[in-house]
Image (spheres, rainbow, N blue to C red):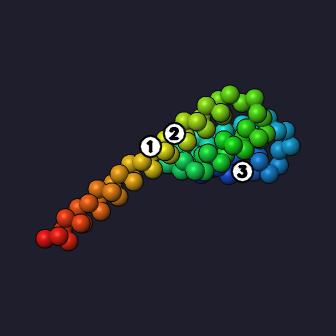
Amino acid sequence: MNDGARLEQLQRLLMEEEDPSARARAHMELARIAVTRGEAELASRHLKEALELDPRLKRARERLHEVEELSQVVREKVRGRRQRAVSILRKFRRK
């Protein structure tokens, strides 16, 4: 099953399922898919939802920490690139 079909299936499950554990597992899977697509913010939201539904989910807590750590690294790299670009532009303006 491709990710698109799996997304539809999981979203349907979230709307129809009443069992919090099953819904938490669906959020975990949605988070996994989001990470593979490079959507860290969406993954983080799904993991937080999973933990609200089932606070005992150690794996969700671990994954949330990893996703947030990854997001921080990306933000730092973007900030560093932006600073380098500004520095280069300033050098061009001086000439």
Residue 35 placement, left or right of 28 = left
How far is mark 3 from mark 1, CA to CA?
A: 30 Å
| Residue indicated by mark 2 | 69
User: Mark 3 touching mark 1, by CB under 8 A?
Assistant: no
Image quadrant in which the C terminus is located: bottom left
Amino acid marked by disc 1: Val
Q: Is residue 82 above or below residue 32?
A: below
Residue 40 placement, left or right of 13 = left
Image quadrant in which the N terminus is located: top right
Q: Is residue 10 above or below residue 57?
A: below
Amino acid marked by disc 3: Gln
| Residue indicated by mark 3 | 11
Q: Please tell me the numbered disc located at residue 73.
A: 1
Mark 2 element type: helix
For the point 33% across and 57% down, the residue is 83
How far is mark 3 from mark 2, CA to CA?
A: 26 Å
The one nearer the camera, 36 or 86, is 86
Quarter of the image holding residue 79?
A: bottom left
